[in-house]
Image (tube, helix red, strand yellow):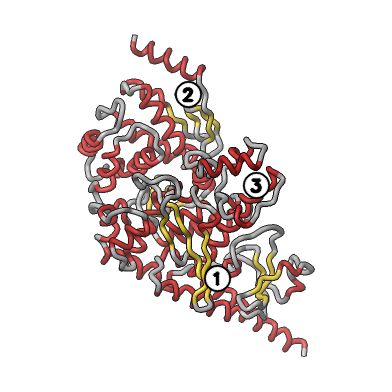
């Protein structure tokens, strides 16, 4: 009788409601169906949840959370998440996952199988982070501090867990390289690019980026040198409204400032084009950097836009659970990177992309460089230091990892530069276009850009772009000295190694260009000698 009722309930559910998604392998599935075909080999049978007597609301929330993973991660990984979660639910979960369920599930595992709980730890934390109901808030603290076989307490968050903890330097560098190339190849938009760069380089919460206005990008001059600051609106502050207090991030990278400025100009153009007007400089200052284009499109009168913007300062900001959420899902789905820290039967697991891990990484890198608990709490916008202990309890091991990560002989120099060296400007793809010239800080050309269109990366990052064509006799050594000097200046100021990764990668690429130039000059000398 129960089975029949469940069957009828499932049939009614699938007919009445529909929510279609696409798996990472681009297979369509409906979250209300009991069979999800994720690729040619793997399909999930969610009908297996019926005997567990889950409440309809909890099962619906689980399906939503699992569907997000199916769109972002490999089919095999999603399948394992489903199976291990089903085993967790069998411990008595009905309407919400509680601490007792986690502990009871852990008790069913041996040292050799505790990895199963580690496997779903990130999934449950993401579930809670996405504000989908079904996970008790106390479970988050338990999971992030739980001792599992092979991990000391706290390392899941700080450095140990490949699903939910901080990224390694190798993972950070690979991800930076990927999203720079993805933007260059137009796989992601300027908005995607700016948002993911903002998250990764600041450790901010997504909602903080969505509340940014153009005026929050601050340039100051000290001793003739430009410095870039970011006024980041606070979030999760009790008794405070939108943009009532700010967290000042001093000396953010020029590359981040360039990209955020480009995104701000994009948002300004959205407003100007829609209302057929031109904003005054003072009006531009108060435009959201990440604007909600859908909200703008609802209005036809510019004065109404100004009035609503003044009354509700977050109305035209990108919604955290709207486009901001989909940006992260797009990035996660597009990213092809694997991590050797997740070993599967058929290779390695996907690199998990989520904003919480960027915060962990940012804080962990600060701890590696000896930052105090107070400095880390301030950087993360937290009111006390209780939550940052996890990043500072393993400094000795972290220091060893930092030394290893920064060892010059481990740097993959051969992969740093992917452009094409040319003998002179006449050999460039855009030889007749003076706008294609790339100049160093002194205004001297160092190469040509082979890209037809807008780019917001900045000169030093051209060396890591596959569209860059450096000139043989250009002053690349001077560029190298300049980048090293800027990196060392930021290091002395206490910048995290995370922030410095972009400089390190550029330095490696410039070294490759200099090496190629020397080799090419030797070739030309030999050719000249043969022609004598």
User: What residue lies at 74% left-to-right and 65% top-to-bottom?
Assistant: 429
Q: CA distance from mark 3 to mark 1?
A: 36 Å
> Which residue is more in the foreground, 8 or 217?
217
Q: Mark 2 and mark 3 in contact? Answer it, CB < 8 Å.
A: no
How packed mark 3 is, by other alpha carbons closer than 10 Å (few <14, some 14-19, many 20 or more), is: some
Camera-nearest label, 2 or 3: 3
Whole-percent x and y of residue 138? 26, 39
- Give the quadrant of residue 449: bottom right
Q: Earlier in the sequence, mark 1 or mark 2?
A: 2
Give me the disc on residue 205.
none
Q: Mark 3 and mark 1 in contact? Answer it, CB < 8 Å.
A: no
Q: Earlier in the sequence, mark 2 or mark 3?
A: 2
User: What residue lies at 35% left-to-right and 70% top-to-bottom?
Assistant: 403
Please say whether residue 84 is visible from this viewpoint: yes
Please say whether residue 326 is visible from this viewpoint: no
* Residue 281 position (above or below residue 273): below
Q: CA distance from mark 2 to mark 3?
A: 39 Å
Mark 2, residue position: 33
Whole-percent x and y of residue 463? 59, 69
Left or right: 226 in relation to 61: right
Mark 1, residue position: 509
Q: Secondary structure at mark 2?
A: loop
Q: CA distance from mark 1 to mark 2?
A: 50 Å
- Give the quadrant of residue 110: top left
Q: Which residue is situated farthest in the right direction here?
A: 432
Give me the disc on residue 270.
3
Give the quarter of the figure containing the C terminus.
bottom right
Whole-percent x and y of residue 497? 41, 66
Whole-percent x and y of residue 519? 62, 80
Q: Secondary structure at mark 1?
A: helix
How packed mark 1 is, by other alpha carbons closer than 10 Å (few <14, some 14-19, many 20 or more), is: many
How packed mark 2 is, by other alpha carbons closer than 10 Å (few <14, some 14-19, many 20 or more), is: many
């Amino acid at each position: 009788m129960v089975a029949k009722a469940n069957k009828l309930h499932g049939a009614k559910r699938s007919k009445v409601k529909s929510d279609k998604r696409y798996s990472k392998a681009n297979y369509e599935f409906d979250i209300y169906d009991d069979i999800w075909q994720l690729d040619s080999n793997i399909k999930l049978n969610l009908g297996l949840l019926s005997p567990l007597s889950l409440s309809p609301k909890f099962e619906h929330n689980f399906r939503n959370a699992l569907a997000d993973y199916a769109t972002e991660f490999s089919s095999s990984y999603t399948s394992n998440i489903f199976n291990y979660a089903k085993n967790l639910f069998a411990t008595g979960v009905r309407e919400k996952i509680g601490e007792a369920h986690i502990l009871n599930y852990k008790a069913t595992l041996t040292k050799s199988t505790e990895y199963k709980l580690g496997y779903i730890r990130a999934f449950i934390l993401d579930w809670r982070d996405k504000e989908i109901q079904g996970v008790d808030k106390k479970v988050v603290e338990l999971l992030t501090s739980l001792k599992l076989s092979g991990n000391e307490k706290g390392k899941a968050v700080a450095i140990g867990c490949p699903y939910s903890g901080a990224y390694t330097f190798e993972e950070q560098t690979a991800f930076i390289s990927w999203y720079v190339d993805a933007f260059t190849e137009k796989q992601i938009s300027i908005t995607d690019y700016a948002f993911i760069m903002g998250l990764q380089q600041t450790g901010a919460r997504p909602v903080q980026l969505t509340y940014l206005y153009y005026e929050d990008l601050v340039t100051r001059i000290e001793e003739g040198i430009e410095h870039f600051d970011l006024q980041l609106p606070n979030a999760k502050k009790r008794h405070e409204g939108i943009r009532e207090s700010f967290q000042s991030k001093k000396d953010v990278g020029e590359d981040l400032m360039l990209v955020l400025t480009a995104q701000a100009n994009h948002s300004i153009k959205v407003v100007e084009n829609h209302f057929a007007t031109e904003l005054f400089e003072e009006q531009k200052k108060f435009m959201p950097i990440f604007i909600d284009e859908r909200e703008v499109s609802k209005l036809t009168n510019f004065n109404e836009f100004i009035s609503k913007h003044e009354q509700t300062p977050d109305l035209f900001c990108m919604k955290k659970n709207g486009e901001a959420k989909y940006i992260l899902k797009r990035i996660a789905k597009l990213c092809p990177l694997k991590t050797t820290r997740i070993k599967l039967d058929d290779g390695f697991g996907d690199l998990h992309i989520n904003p919480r891990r960027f915060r962990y990484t940012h804080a962990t890198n600060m701890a590696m460089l000896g930052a105090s608990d107070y400095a880390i709490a301030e950087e993360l916008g937290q009111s006390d230091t209780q939550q940052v202990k996890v990043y500072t309890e393993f400094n000795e091991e972290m220091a060893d990892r930092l030394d290893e990560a920064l060892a010059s002989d481990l740097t993959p120099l051969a992969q740093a530069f992917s452009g094409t060296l040319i003998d002179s400007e006449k050999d460039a793809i855009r030889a007749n276009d003076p706008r294609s010239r790339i100049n160093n800080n002194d205004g001297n050309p160092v190469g040509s850009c082979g890209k037809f269109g807008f780019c917001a990366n900045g000169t030093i990052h051209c060396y890591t772009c596959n569209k860059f064509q450096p000139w043989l006799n250009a002053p690349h050594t001077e560029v190298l000295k300049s980048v090293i000097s800027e990196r060392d200046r930021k290091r002395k100021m206490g910048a995290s190694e995370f922030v410095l990764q972009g400089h390190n990668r550029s330095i490696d690429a410039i070294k490759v260009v200099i090496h190629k130039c020397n080799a090419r000059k030797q070739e030309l000398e030999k050719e000249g000698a043969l022609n004598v």
